[in-house]
Image: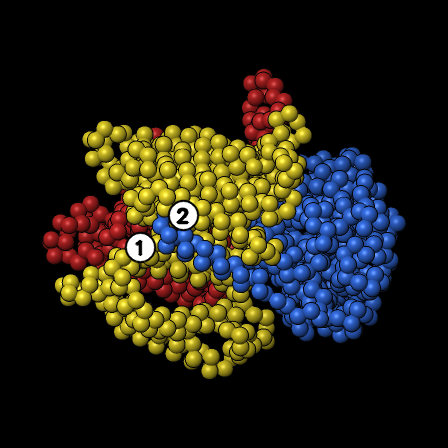
Chain colours: A blue, B red, C yellow
Amino acid sequence: MTRRHLLLTVLSLLFVVVPAGVSHAQDTIKIGYIDPLSGAFAATGENGLNQFKFAAEQINKAGGVLGKKLEIVPFDNKVSPQESLVQLKKVISEGIHFVFQGNSSGVAHAISDAVRKNNERNPKERILYLNYSAVDPSLTEDKCHFWHFRFDANADMKMAALTDVIKQNKKIKKLYIIGQDYSFGHAVADAAVKMLAEKRPDIKIVGNEFHPIGKVKDFTPYVQKIIASGADAVITGNWGADMVNLARGANESGLKVPFYTYYAASDGNTAAIGAGGVDRIRLVGESPAFNPEPATKEMAAYITAYKKLYPNGDVNQPRIQTGLQMLANAITRAKTTDVYKVALALEGMEYTTLSGDHVVMRRSDHQLQMPIYISVHSNKNIKFDFDNSGFGLVTESKVERDKATLPTTCRMERPAA
Amino acid sequence: MFELVFFSLLNGLVFGMLLFMLSSGLTLIFGMMGVLNFAHAAFYMLGAYFAYTLTGYLGFWPALVIAPLLVGVVGALVERHGLRRVHRFGHVAELIFTFGLAVLIEEIVQAVWGRAAKSYEVPELLDFPLFRLFSTSFPAFKAFMLLVSVGIFVLLFLVLTRTRAGLIIQASLTHPSMVGMLGHNVPRVFMAVFGLGSALAGLAGVIAGPVLGTFPGMAQVLGSIVFVVVVIGGLGSLTGAFVASLLIGILQTFAVALNYTLTDLATALGIGLSAQSAFADLWTVTIAQIAPIMPYLLLILVLIVRPMGLFGTRET
Amino acid sequence: MSIVAAPAARRWGLCLAVVVVLVALPHLFGSPIAIAVMNKMGIAIIFALSYNMMLGQGGMLSFGHAVYFGLGGFIAMHALNRLAGGPWAPPVPLLPLVGGLAGLGFGALFGSFSTTRAGTVFAMISLGIVELVASSSLILKGFFGGEEGISGNRTKGLVLWGIRFASDVQVYYLIAFWTVVATGLMYAFSRTPVGRMANAVRDNPERAEFVGYSQRWVRFVSFCAAGFFAGIAGGLFAVNYEILTEEAVGLARSGNVLLMTYIGGIGYFGGPIIGAVIFTFLESMLSDYTPIWLLYLGILFLATVLFVPTGFAGVLMMHEPARRAGRLHRLALPYLAAAVVGLCAAVGIIGLLEMVHFWSAAAVGRTRMRLFWTMLDIKSVAPWLVFGVLAVGGALALRRVAPRAAAAWNEATYGREDAAR
């Protein structure tokens, strides 16, 4: 290796000085958003980002937090656990202390672990991880820790509500489970098998299928299997492109059995399901549907304002607004952005959502406790549709918060300061 | 059971014929120029995206004709200005060039059309179930796909064996210098073949886009499988490409339908396998889960045992 | 290469200088992101150099080199997780060695049948292997960890001399150490008989056989050695990120290493080092400024393949004769002119690309974007005109200026008297 090469290598390393010089204005509170903005799940990530930006706008219009404005800083992780860690390093170096993430429990596990390690090793650069959509129960059970907060009902809570509904439907004798092959998909399947065995032991599970996440475009072979099994109903936790493609495959092959899902609405799902899914596709979620009327006037105003700014988007994740507002309240209550103090203020916090639900952030495992709603895909009395399709969700039943609350095995270690 | 077999066969046929449309162009290009075109699947992607945009302005049917032609032109230009220049640096350089081209096309598509999937939909005329057997329907668009693929196969066969241009192409496949000496413009023949192959890939994109999705990663999804097909069938052999496409297409579709595992086999043979052993994953994985890797296993096997493929005559 | 004839003192002086610089770097650039990028560069350097052992020195184009990198990383991670706290607990500094041995093992396994043939067949087999391993990663969950991958904690390794590797700076020094050691070893390998024969087999396999070496054996040894060093890079990756997923063994990573090695220059030992640094830097930093950074990288790659197949290193070495003859200064003005014109063309093309991307990706109604430190409205004709003129005009002007720069280089390299020839 000649001296020239050495010189060049050193000179090129000098380029590293550029990022060191990146400076930001100090008059905003930056909130990081790590989710996919490219790749198979880009649409989901972008819709989420828009909802965060809108929620932050509303908070800023009302005066901001501690006199400063909230700024949402997006980071693209391509639903890759590894890429998320790279983005997390960027988050730290840009002086951001609060990070929201939700798409993919696989990523959530990686981020949760990395945040815990980082806060242990670098107490001066602590981050708070706010999980708004990754619902693998493990994150608030065996893998729980002080710096993680979850704002969506976890997969077990949702399955409990879903199986209660299935229990009532005596026509179901054979049930097929299909899901994405990763932690969350497995959590859904395990919970379904366990809870159905307790509530309806007469139901036979005729299929428990896992497919690679984000890779299958044509679900026809899988739908074929469902039909061949003679199932009367299907349970699936599929989300994003996987749910859209599954719905499309089911429609094309003429599969007409009821679907009990976690995420079969908006993000293209409602349009893909269309007329074929009316009164057949059900969804379990953390907020009431917006039809025939939103639960409160405030929610109606929020949705209308959002649609004006993002005509091709929908407020399909009201938990985003809940999470951001609760964080803002915690910062206000703690009177500082110091992560430890904010976390202390956030746990145990009670809050009333835009839809009028009373929720509380349970101290023992940092899982938000809330009522759970089952909605059904419909075209009757639709005031606020999804995907500009004319179809939307109508609330069918509600599980009150005290019924929806499940015990936890979390043993949280609390840091001293 | 019959329903499952019948529809799996039908779907496998549709997928296999689509693979053939893609691999026929690739094997022709390889047979003639010795270049394994990594960017072939990228042309497939371009076809889908062009069709998506053109459908917005002109409708699906004009797009069906114009988009592949556009892709063919792009292919011809790539050959004329890129591949020809790199040719003198050797095979490795050509491979690297087409690899870089694949990356570039994918990035250009993302830059121009964005990262999210495009809602390139089945045209309304074809958006209905063609027939319904027992409790499954078969969409008309898939039948259309089959029709187009078979039509292209027949057309290709006729052109290559019955027309003068086809005979010149066949001759250039094996004796390019002699064909040149007989007075034909061999570089132009190469350019035409490259353009034709790319147009075929583009056409595959136009008809597969609504079914398999139109998104920036679509080239990678099919790219590897197409290479597997071409290598297994035999580099340069159209018959081989045909047989291998159908084989892989049907195999993959059927594999998803089967849930048998090695444990089932062992139990049938009376052997007990522990679910706790370190190799438990291997025993309990179902054939459906292995479906994605079977083509690659086949590829490696063929390359070790018979590198020229099933019907091929040369390795490089 | 001039260094072969250099006196030992000069060589050791060079090594010392490199070590001093590497030790000083974290003090000059201490921000977390700078350390993270430098760690990434170190790993990329080892990986790219190992790849060039096959491509540049052996003439073997492989699309599956990431397999040995990733598998080395996975084995290292498993070793850390399973053996930590026990009698065989590995010290973190030795984990890359574990990864290297794993890479060597898998290299021997896959190389046994891959290296029977060279050229296109070899490339296809490597493609098959990488797709196979990447797809298996979702099936063999025990080893690959499924979608979540395998994570570990590097502070749980055997602690030597009180270094727990909790901070990224300590990991930096580990990576820097291994980079120097691995580079030195790889350079030494290229000087051994089998390393030199690899060059011969690349250029003329038949002739190499006549000289008495089995081309298959030489290729196999190169393959295994490349796998060993890729495994070392993988082990360092495991230590740095503490998580390994199926991406580490995927086609994308194999493609990236091909890109960076080729851009750097496959004909020179130090070429991949340059390529790795440039690629890593662009990958980490450029993505902050523009979402289409990979497009620019792809253009750079294609331009290298078409116009500068010798890579960056080749371009630099092209000026060695001029430097030795002391005529380098004559290139200053013509190169400057070409650079300015080239910059105009580049600005124009970048502007157009960025605007097209913004136009297709932006939300409904947003037409103002930030480009080159100014706000632009893409609905108005002005920015399109400006960038269009810059691009086209710059390209045309470049066609005029480039021959002059080439003539100046001729003159500087061959001297005024010979330049006329």
Q: What residue type is labelled 1?
A: Met
Q: Quadrant of residue A383?
A: bottom right
Q: Quadrant of residue A70?
A: bottom right
**Marks 2/1 same chain:** yes
Chain designation of label 2: C
Q: Which residue lies furthest to the top in this view?
A: B270
Which comes before the other along the chain, label 2 or label 1?
2
Lateral position of residue A112 relative to residue A325, left or right: left
> Dots 2 and 1: beta carbons under 8 Å?
no
Tell me the residue at 53%/61% (across/down): A17
Q: Which amino acid does label 2 sit on?
A: Leu
Instruction: State the image coordinates of residue B139 (x, y, percent, origin top left).
Output: 52, 52
Pointer 1 residue:
C317
Relative depth, front residue between C130 and B65: C130
Tell me the residue at 34%/62% (across/down): B74
Tell me the residue at 40%/61% (across/down): C299
The nearer-to-camera label among 2 and 1 is: 2
Mark 2 surroundings within 10 Å by alpha-carbon count, few (fewer than 14), some (14 through 19), many (20 or more): some
- Residue A339 makes an appearance in the image: yes
Instruction: State the image coordinates of residue A303 (x, y, percent, origin top left).
Output: 73, 69
Mark drawn on residue C14: 2
What SS does tag 2 mark?
A: helix
Q: Residue furthest front?
A: C9
Instruction: State the image coordinates of residue C340 (x, y, percent, origin top left).
Output: 37, 73
Relative depth, front residue between C341 and C159: C159
Mark drawn on residue A46: none
Lateral position of residue C319 relative to residue B217, left or right: left
Instruction: State the image coordinates of residue A183 (x, y, percent, origin top left).
Output: 66, 42
Relative depth, front residue between B73 and A15: A15
Compared to residue A289, the image places residue C201 above or below, namely above
